[in-house]
């Protein structure tokens, strides 16, 4: 049998117990001796009364000392623990409940999900605790809170809990729980982890060798299911982040089966409506690719998903969400010398097709650019422009930082001194050193054939960019430690194409001309037209880039160049979050993606975009680890036990007993002592 205190610091109150003795000694009166006639019988009577008085005072002093001591003990909340007490009694503990909130806990077996099983066991555990216990409960993927004695609030928190569809690691979660119990010195110290023992949640534990305090008990309740009848849509990729109205876009979905073969129907959903469906056969844990084709009917942000027609045991990963920006046309401002612009304009917007062209080109003289309204412009093209005023460069800088694109072509009129980082107000991170002309034509060397500009030319499609067609170019020199990326070089020479990100936009510099004056690229026809379109598309790519996130992760969503100040994010299910944004703010930071599905963003009531949120697919494969492998991740002195239910839990031997709270006993004793002191003190 052991005696413990919930608040041992308050035992210092016992130091106040001798106060009644001290007060008695201070207030004790001494009789004065007065000479008087011999009254022997009166003296004998007084002596007898004095003995009774002293006995009365002694009893009162003892009762008052007992009152002070009982009050100090009462405040320290003592309890007695013994193995001889039945554990059916309530247990007083300091406990941390860790609830596995990963995706796999949403797996349904029978009438309940694994998360619902875990919730039931957690509530049963709370029912074994007394009101003096302190508990912290938190999902595995989050940070724990402090211990709380408000068990009613804890029960409500557990009853309302549900898995969130994210991934997490059990090892670090146990370590965080152990740190909460470091400051607890008395009573039971327990960690209860409710999980399904999926292997991905325990990766790396064997190397960690987690060490728990010798007096901390870790109980792991396995609520998992050995079967894996789960098929998953684990990824969706769109051919291009930008699409055009009535132009088909390829959408590929990666799907995987469970521990047995299955035949499933897969659907493409756009705007909440099914637009296509295909069947796919899935072998055991094999991945298959299913391709859909979709032609957008209108411009704007399109919300879509790929899903199984019929949900399975883990419905949360049966659907994968995506978004596509659909453009009617790219709006481009073309600023040039007025002569070589003809080739570029015809490549982007041929005569007779201007209304259906993918690019709408508006010519603007360099002098007029400074005062031109770029509010509806997607990309500005500078072709063979000699120089720009500092104010024009500053305007372009703000335009690009706000999400616009800038595409620059060289030419005979270009003044190298006007194209430096300083002269361009920081728009450029390259310097133009000189113009170089070679007697023999040269070709380009592509740095990354998989880049968005060059990937469509792989295998000879859309023309051959390796042809020797370049005679003259500007020698570009990127600044040291600059953000510029060289996408292509003239063979054995300087950069041919350089890009950089600036704010939310992008800058591209092509070191040769857009007309036949410096190269023969327009003369060969096929490579020229698709190359110009790809350069324009890539320059505007950051403006229309789509945002995707996983549940629980932070999100940063680009904002329109012109926007209001009150942003509202509406999550699937109707929950909304409000944000205050500055007029100059380019991105909206969101601390955590709340739910999977499509989130929509409005600013001052007007639609401003949205993004897709998906569950983390790592736990979709419900391969389980073993209790033996988990136990190896803890040191030998750590007390770790496993069970499939609270009833089957093997508790620590010294913890098998229950505990008795002495608070009611002390209350009764204090009342009796107080009553006795009051009655005895008023006795005549």
Image: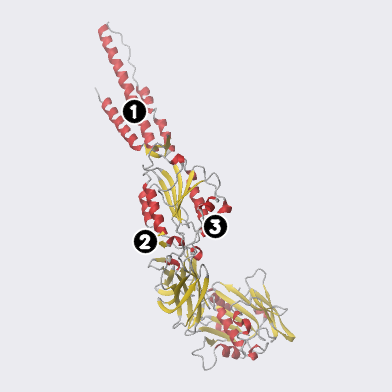
Secondary element type, mark 3: loop
Circles 1 and 2: CB atoms closer than 8 Å: no
Q: Looking at the image, is mark 3 or mark 1 nearer the viewer? A: 3
The location of residue 391, given as percent across then percent down, is: 57, 78
Q: Identify the disc placed on residue 203.
A: 3
Q: Report the Cα–Cα distance between label 2 and label 3.
A: 30 Å
Q: Nearer the viewer, residue 564 or 44?
A: 44
Q: Which residue appears farthest toward the right when viewing the image? A: 439
The location of residue 658, given as percent across then percent down, is: 39, 40
Q: Identify the disc placed on residue 328.
A: none
Task: Evaluate whether residue 153 shows in this view.
Answer: yes
Q: Which residue appears farthest toward the top when viewing the image? A: 38
The location of residue 515, given as percent across then percent down, is: 64, 88
Residue linked to disc 1: 64
Q: Nearer the viewer, residue 38 or 380?
A: 380
Position of 357 relative to 99 (above/below): below
Q: Nearer the viewer, residue 504 or 319?
A: 319
Q: Report the Cα–Cα distance between label 1 and label 2.
A: 62 Å
Q: Report the Cα–Cα distance between label 3 and label 1.
A: 62 Å
Task: Evaluate whether residue 421 shows in this view.
Answer: no
Secondary element type, mark 1: helix
Q: Which residue appears farthest toward the front when viewing the image? A: 260
CA neighbours of label 3 inside 10 A, class few (<14), some (14 to 19), many (20+): some
Residue linked to disc 2: 111
Q: Which residue appears farthest toward the bottom when viewing the image? A: 352
């Amino acid at each position: 049998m052991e005696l413990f205190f919930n608040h041992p610091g308050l035992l210092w109150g016992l130091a106040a117990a001798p106060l009644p003795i001290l007060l008695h000694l201070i207030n004790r009166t001494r009789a004065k001796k007065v000479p008087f006639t011999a009254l022997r019988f009166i003296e004998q009577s007084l002596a007898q009364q004095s003995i009774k008085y002293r006995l009365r005072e002694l009893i009162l002093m003892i009762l008052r000392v007992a009152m002070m001591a009982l009050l100090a003990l009462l405040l320290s909340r003592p309890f007695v623990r013994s193995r001889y007490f039945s554990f059916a009694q309530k247990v007083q503990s300091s406990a941390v409940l860790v609830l596995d909130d990963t995706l796999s806990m949403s797996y349904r077996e029978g009438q309940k999900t694994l998360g619902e099983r875990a919730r039931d066991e957690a509530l049963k555990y709370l029912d074994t605790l007394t009101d003096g216990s302190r508990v912290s409960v938190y999902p595995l993927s989050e940070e724990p809170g402090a211990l709380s004695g408000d068990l009613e609030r804890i029960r409500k928190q557990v009853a309302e809990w549900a898995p969130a569809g994210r991934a997490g690691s059990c090892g670090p979660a146990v370590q965080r729980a152990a740190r909460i119990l470091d400051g607890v010195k008395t009573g039971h110290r327990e960690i209860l982890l409710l999980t399904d023992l999926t292997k991905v949640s325990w990766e790396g534990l064997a190397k960690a060798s987690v060490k728990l305090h010798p007096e901390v008990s870790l109980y792991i309740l396995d609520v998992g299911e050995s079967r894996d009848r789960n098929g998953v849509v684990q990824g969706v990729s769109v051919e291009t982040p930008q699409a055009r109205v009535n132009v088909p876009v390829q959408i590929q979905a990666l799907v995987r089966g469970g521990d047995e073969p299955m035949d499933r129907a897969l659907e493409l959903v756009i705007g909440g409506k099914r637009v296509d469906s295909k069947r796919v056969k899935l072998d055991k844990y094999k991945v298959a690719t299913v391709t859909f084709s979709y032609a957008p009917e209108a411009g704007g942000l399109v919300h879509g998903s790929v899903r199984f027609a019929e949900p399975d045991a883990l419905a949360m990963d049966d659907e994968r969400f995506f978004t596509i920006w659909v453009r009617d046309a790219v709006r481009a401002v073309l600023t040039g010398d007025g002569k070589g612009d003809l080739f570029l304009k015809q490549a982007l917007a041929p005569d007779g097709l201007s209304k259906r062209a993918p690019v709408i080109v508006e010519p603007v003289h360099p002098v007029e650019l400074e005062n031109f309204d770029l509010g509806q412009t997607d990309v500005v093209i500078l072709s063979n422009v000699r120089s720009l005023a500092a104010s024009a460069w500053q305007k372009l800088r703000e335009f690009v930082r706000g999400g616009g694109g800038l595409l620059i072509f060289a030419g005979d009129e270009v003044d190298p001194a006007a194209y430096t980082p300083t002269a361009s107000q920081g728009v450029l991170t390259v310097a133009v050193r000189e113009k170089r002309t070679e007697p023999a034509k040269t070709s380009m060397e592509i740095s990354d054939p998989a880049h968005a500009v060059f990937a469509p030319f792989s295998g000879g499609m859309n023309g051959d960019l390796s042809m020797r067609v370049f005679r003259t170019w500007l020698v570009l020199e990127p600044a040291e430690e600059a953000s510029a990326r060289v996408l292509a070089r003239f063979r054995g020479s300087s950069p041919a194409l350089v890009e950089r990100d600036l704010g939310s936009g992008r800058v591209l510099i092509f070191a040769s001309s857009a007309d036949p004056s410096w190269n023969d690229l327009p003369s060969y026809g096929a490579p020229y037209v698709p190359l110009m379109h790809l350069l324009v598309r890539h320059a505007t790519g950051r403006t229309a880039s789509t945002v995707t996130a996983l549940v629980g992760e932070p999100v940063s969503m680009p904002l329109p160049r012109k926007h209001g100040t009150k942003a509202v994010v509406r999550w699937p299910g109707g929950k909304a979050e409000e944000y205050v944004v500055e007029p100059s703010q380019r991105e909206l930071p969101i601390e955590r993606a709340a739910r999977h599905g499509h989130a929509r963003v409005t600013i001052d009531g007007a639609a401003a975009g949205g993004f897709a949120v998906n569950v983390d697919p790592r736990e979709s494969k419900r391969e389980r680890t073993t209790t033996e492998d988990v136990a190896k991740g803890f040191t030998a002195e750590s007390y770790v036990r496993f069970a499939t239910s609270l009833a089957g839990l093997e508790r620590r031997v010294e913890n098998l007993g229950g505990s008795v709270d002495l608070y009611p006993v002390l209350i009764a004793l204090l009342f009796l002592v107080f009553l006795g002191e009051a009655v005895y003190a008023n006795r005549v």
